[in-house]
Image: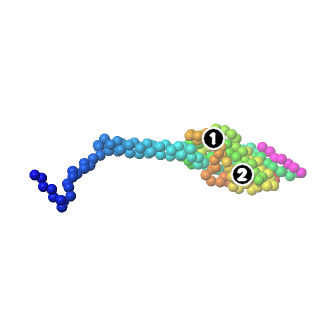
Amino acid sequence: MNVIDLDRPAVRGVPETRAPHAFTLAALVIGVVIGGAVTYGWNLRRQAAARDNEVSVLLFADAREVVDDGSIVLHGRVASVTLTRRVTVVNVGPAPVNIRNLAADRPGLTVRGVEKQRWIAPGATAQADADVQVDCLRGLPLGRIPVTLSVQTLGEHSRTARPKDVFDGTPWSGQAELACAGNA
């Protein structure tokens, strides 16, 4: 005979709890490791591409005379002069750059580089010729000149860039002033 105690709730079997399968846990860990490695590799490639496309150059006016192309005289006074001068280009960036050209325009002054291939390694310098056209009434003194560069990096096509610091044309100013005075 079975005795049933009505004061106590019936005892039922404890439901089984499933422990995670070792396979599911291993797959999850492997997925996390692979995802982390792919993300890390992607970040490294993105950083390397950004570094390879970075353009950081300095420009300096070289005061040595190259060529004086001539003057335009109006009413007995020199109205404008064109001088060919040198620019020293220093690559202070992390990757080689090709400085193909340089240009500057402001009232009374135009600077144009001679288009040419100039691959410059990091930390290296190169020389570039520039034609400096000065309107004698509005372009002097030369001072700071906003220059735009036509550049090419290893990882991309040609684009425009600015030098790291403003270009100072002061070393050319005295020569331009003499030419404008007719003493060149």
Q: Position of residue 179 (x, y in %)?
A: 79, 50
The picture places residue 40, in percent across and down from the top left corner, at: 44, 45
Q: Seen in the image, is 3 located left or right of residue 123?
A: left
Who's the residue at 47% across and 46% down the image?
Answer: 43
Q: Is residue 86 magenta?
A: no
Q: Which residue is mark 2?
A: 172
Distance of label 2 from label 1 (alpha carbons) = 29 Å
Q: Residue at x 53, y 46 (%)?
A: 51
Q: Which mark is in front, 2 or 1?
A: 1
Q: Quadrant of residue 95?
A: top right
Mark 1 surroundings within 10 Å by alpha-carbon count, few (fewer than 14), some (14 through 19), many (20 or more) = some
Instruction: Tell me where the magenta segment starts and ends, as one range.
Output: 69-75
**Residue 129 against residue 146 in the figure, above or below:** above
Q: Residue 144 bears which disc, if any?
A: none
- Residue 115 visible in the snapshot: yes
Q: Specify whether residue 128 is in view.
A: no
- Who's the residue at 89% across and 51% down the image? 75
**Residue type at numbered disc 2:** Trp
Classed neighbour count for the residue bearing mark 2: other residues with Cα under 10 Å, few (<14), some (14–19), many (≥20): many
Nearest the camera: 97 or 125? Answer: 97
Is the C-beta separation of discs 2 and 1 under 8 Å? no
Q: Circle 2 sits in a helix, a strand or a loop, which is it?
A: helix
The residue positioned 62% from the left and 53% from the top of the image is 165
Disc 1 on helix, strand or loop? loop
Question: 24 or 51: nearer the eye?
Answer: 24
Disc 1 designates what residue?
158
The amino acid sitting under disc 1 is Ser
